[in-house]
Image (cartoon, coloured by chain):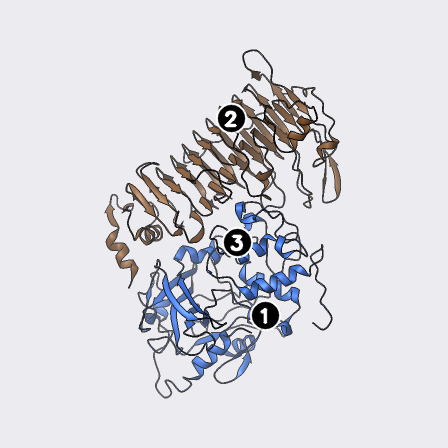
Amino acid sequence: MNLMLSVLAAVALMTTAAEARTWRVRPGPDAQELLQGAFIQAEPGDTIRLTEGRYELWAGLSLDVDRVTLRGEGADRTILSFTGQRQGAEGILITSDDVTFRDFAVENAKGDAIKAQGCARITLRDLRVEWTGGPNPENGAYGLYPVNCTDVLIDGAVVRGASDAGIYVGQSRNIIVRNSLAEYNVAGIEIENSFNADVYRNVATRNTGGILVFDLPGLPQQGGHAIRLFENRIVQNDTPNFAPAGNIVAGVPTGTGVMVMANRDVHVFENEIGDNGTANVLIVAYRAQIDDPNYNPLPRDVTIRNNRFGRSGFAPAGDLASLAAAGVPLPDILWDGATNYVAAGTPRTEPVRIALIGNRKGERDLPTFLSLGVPVAGADLTEAAPDPTPPPAVAMPEPERVRLPQD
Amino acid sequence: MRVAALVCVLLFGAFSIAGAGVRAPGVALDAVLAARPAPTLSAYRLFLDAGARVANAGVTPYALNTALYSDGALKIRHVYMPPGAQARHRDDGVFDFPVGTVLVKTFAFAADMRAPAQDVRYLETRLLIRHEDGWVARPYVWNAAQTEARYAPVSAPIPVDFIDAAGASAHLDWAVPNQNQCRGCHDRDDAIAPIGPSARNLNGDFAYRDVAENQLRRWTRLGLLDRAPEDAPRAPDAFDPATGSLAERARAYLDVNCAHCHNPQGPARTSGLDLRASNDAPARWGVRKRPVAAGRASAGLEFAIAPGAPDASILVHRMQSLDPGVMMPELGRQTRDAEGVALVRAWIARMDADGHVTEAAGE
């Protein structure tokens, strides 16, 4: 039986313009084939409308046609459920350019929920991604996962339950993540090995760590830089770390607000950051052995300014807990203090500039600061030489605002 | 030793006199070059019979030294090139095939896989066709009567029951990859590309219906290939110790089963793991390489390959898994490749910290 015939029969086609068409897909027993059929037969410029309801899918979907819009009736009304997924490493994979996804939900994908690989001008708007059983190491790793993309817009997303990062943008350039809610994930929002990102007006709460800016060695794109985090609420990140061991985020202490690791030109400003039990801001070097001679594990040129801080350090976790138990009070802003590192066997050193300017804690206080003064990146915390003296408040140029052609 | 070559001999040997004296029309080059897929496989006239058991003139069967695991399915491969056209030899990677080339791969199961030439049921035939602007993938699904294969860019799974090679009864819901999933494996620099027919993987004998002959020599003799150096690279048969060392065979297995994605231009490039046999930097083919975006698929293990410790190696864990969010490859299998897992486990178990394996005496 030729399924294409049934696909054509069951998907209503409406011609709306000379070249652009609108496909309408409804839930039902053939949802998998209908939806994947539309993804394959769509032509550039087409829109695929998902009517209200729950689509039960048994395999991952993939889209490889440029300029396609996939649009539901709302993140609580059109639901793509992968609870019964038996095939495919992600819920939906996008590999084409100028794609927009909006107004639907993806639930319980077996791996990542929506992955966009190698895409230009990808827009993910008003989506909900959720693992409905709550935090669980068996949940998929990433909710919204653009990797190796340019011009990424994520706006109005709600992401819950990812066992790695709710919103994860990796090895990409020109990124905006805004107006989104990330909760009950290990990492709420993570920008990794990426260049030029604006992350603003998001809420990151009830995660293990709120917003992470990381750079890892040994990848095609590294040297993450030019990241701005502003006007976010990064509060009460208190979900015990449920990442599978071995993953980089498994090392994020429960109760972390912002964590900056091995990036440069990172500006964190005008955020509300509080009620994070370990630290409101962690600034640290990558700690594992480095075989890559071109990798720099140090965070450098980091500006923390005009933020409003709330409580922190009241429930320290991870290896910082033992430090606290040893009598070192944990501050709002904690830097490991590393300025030396070893890459591929060669010792190197580099000046690290961290500026704290105009931050407040409560009504009148300044947030507290501590450098652990570790002798070299990755050193054991038993070698720490803590020093609460804030670094000199040098002004560092702020990265330019990110502008996207599709925004 | 895998059975694909044997099946080809039996299938094609049986028809050695088919068509004698009568000149059948050749392959339909217009269908091959058409922008739109033909609705049925028969429209291409790659085969003389409705069941596609007898190849047309100019359609040459071939086999690979080491093949991708596909749930133990038989794979029957043919290549067609337009008259006068030929592929250009490359030492590394797939040959440079001319416009009009068709790579034909049929997936099939025998009712009893211990007798792989009897009661063979074709499930699907995939065509990779070289057009002027690149390769296109076209899947065709066979009907139950085995008389027609229809174009199926999206297809429901096909239930299959058979006796497996170990004599146990087996059931599969054979998942025909859709067009996009084809690209999941057949992707180079964001374009569709063949995986198998490279010098190293074709450099071996094939039992043609007239004579057993080295495939590179045969292709050159038939004019399908411009040249074949005497010292062309040769991939071992991953499961035949006579054809290579343990390390060579394990790397050949990973090359064919993983490197179509795990290469610097492939879909898995963002992982930093490069499993091509030609990659000679152990840290880049997995030795003590930490996971990047594996999520729960890492199962709490630290390294892709932990030398000496297969059970602590993410690579082995993901080869063994049947969970869609964990398993590797991501597509194209629903069962474990027990032989492949055993090979890779043995290799990692004997590996030193630098990724080297010392062969035991007598191996």
Q: Position of residue B210 (x, y in %)?
A: 49, 85
Q: Nearer the viewer, residue A189 or B97?
A: A189
Q: Identify the hue of chain B.
A: blue
Q: Are marks 1 and 3 in contact (CB under 8 Å)?
A: no
Q: Secondary structure at mark 2?
A: loop
Q: Amino acid at mark 2?
A: Gln
* Disc nearest the viewer among 1 and 3: 1
The residue singled out by tag 1 in the image is B239
Q: Is residue A323 left or right of residue B127?
A: right
Chain letter, disc 3 residue: B
Chain letter, disc 2 residue: A
Above or below A246: residue A384: above
Cα–Cα span, label 1 and label 2: 55 Å
Q: Are marks 3 and 2 in contact (CB under 8 Å)?
A: no
Figure chain in brown: A
The residue singled out by tag 3 in the image is B266
Tell me the quadrant of the picture where the C terminus of chain A can be found.
top left
Q: Are marks 1 and 2 in contact (CB under 8 Å)?
A: no
Q: Is residue B103 visible?
A: no
Among the 4 quarters of the image, the one containing residue A261: top right
The residue singled out by tag 2 in the image is A236
